C-alpha cells in the first residue's frame, strides 16, 4: 500500500533529520501511527468492502487522506532538499531556514492526523464497535488487528413474526449439548416461504465463534435454493425472541439489505442477544425451559418500475390568442374555443368578476388541458406557461407565469387574482378597447412523465 512506503519515508526522514526536525517530530510520529492504523484497517476489513456500505465508504475516505499524506510528505522532503541546496550544505540547516518548514510539517501533520481520527470517530458513531486487539507498539511501527461488530438494533413490539415462529423446548439441555458437541452447534428451523423464496433460520445457541459471536446467541438466515450464475436475491430481515412474561417480542435487526447469491447464501447477526439474557428469569425469554424465536424476511424485488421524464421538443407554435368580444356582456365564466399545442387540446377559461378568493375583486384566468383524463398509468405533464392580457394603449401585456403538473385529476391551473378589476376598468388602460379583451396563452416548456416498464 502507498501508506506503507509513506510510513517508512517518515521514519527514515526522522532519523536523518533528527536534529533540526525535533520540533515537528512528535507530530510526524503521530501521523505515522495513524497511517499504520489505516493500513491495518484496510487489510482487516477488505473482505467486508463489498458487503458493507459503511466499511466501503470508510475505506474510501481513509485512502483519500493517506494519498494526501503522501503528497504532503513529498512536499516536506523536497522543501528540505531545496533549503540544503540553497545553503550549499548537506548538514543541519540554519535555524532561521528551518522555522518555516518545521511549522509547515507540524501544521500539515496535525491536520491530516485530525482528519484520520475524525473518520474513525464517524465510523464508530454508526454504532459499530471497533476494537484494537493484540496490538504491539514499537518505536517505529504498530501492528493492529481489528474486530468489527455490525450495529444491532433491539426494540420491543406486540405483533408476532409474520414469516416464522420457531419454538425450542428443553433449551438448557440443548444448550449443554451444543457446548459439548461441535457437530450440533447450528440449530436450523424447517423451511418457510417469504417473498417467493424458501428460507431457513439458523441459530447458534452458544454463538458463532467464527463470526465474533462468543457470549451471544447468533441468528442467521439461509436461502435454500442457491442462485445460479450472477442471479441474486436482495433482502433485509428481522429476528425475534418472545418475552413470555409480557407477551411481547424482542425485535433484532441491523437495518441492512443483504445480497444472497451463489457465493453467499447465508447472512445474519452474530451478536443478537447475550446468552446471559436467557438465564435471567426477569426477561421472560426462557420459561419452563422453552423459548420462542422468529423471523421476518423482506425481499426487495429486482424488477423496478422504470419511469421516464422527457422534455417535449418544440415542433409547433406554442402560443394562442383569444379575442373575447362583447366583454361587458359577460356575467359568468367563459371558455375559449379549443386550440392545439404540441398535439394536445387546450382551452382558456375567464371569470370576468373573479372566482374563489378573487371574486368581485379580480379577473380570474385559467388554462385547461382538455384531454387530461387520458393521463393515466402514472403519466403527468409538466407545463411552464404564461397568461397575459394586452393593454392596447401601451402595447404591453399584463402577464403572469407559472409551472404546473397536469394529470388525470388536475386538468386546469391559473390565477384567481390575475388582474384587479380596478386596473381592468382603469380609463388610462386599454384592456377593453372596443369592448374586446385580448388574451394570450404561451407555453414555454413541456415535460412528460411516462411509465416505461
Image (spheres, helix red, strand yellow):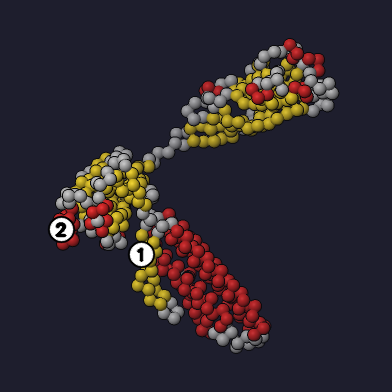
| Gap in angstroms between the C-alphas marked 1 and 2 | 28 Å
Q: In the visual, does 356 lie left or right of 207?
A: right
Image quarter where the C terminus lies is top left
Q: Position of residue 66 (x, y in %)?
A: 50, 67
Nearer to us in this view, 230 or 347: 347
Secondary structure category for the residue under label 2 = helix
Nearer to us in this view, 355 or 230: 355
Query: What label does residue 147 carry, if any?
Result: 1
Which residue in the structure is indicated by mark 2? 177
Mark sitting earlier along the chain (1/2): 1
Q: Give the residue displayed 56% in from the left and 69% down from the top.
A: 111
Badge 1: how crowded within 10 Å, few (<14), some, or many (20+)? some
Task: Tell me if I can see residue 440 in this picture.
Answer: no
| Residue 392, placed above or below residue 138 | above
| Residue 24, placed above or below residue 186 | below
Nearer to us in this view, 208 or 76: 208
Amino acid at each position: 500500500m502507498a501508506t506503507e512506503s509513506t510510513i517508512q519515508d517518515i521514519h527514515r526522514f526522522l532519523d536523518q533529520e533528527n536534529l533540526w526536525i525535533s520540533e515537528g517530530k512528535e507530530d510526524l510520529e503521530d501521523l505515522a501511527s495513524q497511517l499504520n492504523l489505516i493500513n491495518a484497517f484496510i487489510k482487516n476489513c477488505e473482505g467486508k468492502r463489498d458487503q458493507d456500505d459503511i466499511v466501503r465508504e470508510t475505506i474510501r475516505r481513509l485512502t483519500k487522506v493517506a494519498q494526501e499524506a503522501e503528497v504532503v510528505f513529498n512536499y516536506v522532503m523536497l522543501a528540505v532538499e531545496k533549503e540544503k541546496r540553497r545553503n550549499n550544505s548537506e548538514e543541519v540547516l540554519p535555524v532561521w531556514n528551518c522555522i518555516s518548514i518545521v511549522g509547515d510539517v507540524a501544521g500539515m501533520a496535525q491536520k491530516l492526523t485530525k482528519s484520520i481520527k475524525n473518520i474513525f470517530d464517524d465510523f464508530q458513531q454508526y454504532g459499530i464497535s471497533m476494537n484494537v486487539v493484540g496490538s504491539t507498539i514499537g518505536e517505529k511501527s504498530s501492528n493492529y488487528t481489528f474486530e468489527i461488530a455490525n450495529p444491532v438494533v433491539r426494540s420491543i413490539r406486540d405483533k408476532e413474526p409474520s414469516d416464522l415462529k420457531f419454538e425450542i423446548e428443553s433449551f438448557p439441555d440443548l444448550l449443554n449439548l451444543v457446548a459439548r458437541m461441535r457437530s450440533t452447534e447450528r440449530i436450523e428451523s424447517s423451511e418457510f416461504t417469504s417473498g417467493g423464496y424458501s428460507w431457513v433460520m439458523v441459530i447458534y445457541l452458544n454463538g458463532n465463534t467464527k463470526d465474533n459471536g462468543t457470549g451471544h446467541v447468533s441468528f442467521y438466515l439461509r436461502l435454500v435454493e442457491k442462485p445460479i450464475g450472477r442471479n441474486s436475491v436482495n433482502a433485509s430481515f428481522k429476528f425475534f425472541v418472545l418475552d413470555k412474561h409480557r407477551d411481547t417480542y424482542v425485535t433484532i435487526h441491523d437495518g441492512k439489505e443483504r445480497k444472497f447469491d451463489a457465493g453467499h447464501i447465508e447472512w445474519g447477526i452474530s451478536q443478537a442477544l447475550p446468552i446471559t439474557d436467557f438465564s435471567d428469569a426477569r426477561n421472560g425469554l426462557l420459561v419452563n425451559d422453552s423459548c420462542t424465536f422468529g423471523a421476518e424476511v423482506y425481499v426487495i424485488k429486482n424488477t423496478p418500475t422504470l419511469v421516464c421524464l422527457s422534455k417535449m421538443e418544440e415542433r409547433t407554435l406554442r402560443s394562442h390568442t383569444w379575442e373575447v368580444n362583447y366583454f361587458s356582456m359577460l356575467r359568468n365564466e367563459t371558455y375559449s374555443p379549443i386550440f392545439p399545442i404540441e398535439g394536445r387540446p387546450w382551452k382558456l377559461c375567464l371569470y370576468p368578476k373573479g372566482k374563489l378568493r378573487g371574486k368581485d375583486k379580480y379577473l380570474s384566468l385559467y388554462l385547461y388541458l382538455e384531454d387530461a383524463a387520458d393521463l393515466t398509468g402514472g403519466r403527468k405533464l409538466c407545463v411552464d406557461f404564461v397568461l397575459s392580457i394586452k393593454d392596447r394603449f401601451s402595447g404591453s401585456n399584463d402577464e403572469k407565469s407559472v409551472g404546473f403538473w397536469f394529470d388525470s385529476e388536475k386538468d386546469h391551473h391559473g390565477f384567481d387574482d390575475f388582474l384587479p378589476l380596478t386596473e381592468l376598468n382603469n380609463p388610462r388602460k386599454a384592456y377593453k378597447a372596443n369592448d374586446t379583451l385580448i388574451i394570450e396563452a404561451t407555453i414555454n416548456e413541456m415535460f412528460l412523465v411516462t411509465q416505461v416498464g
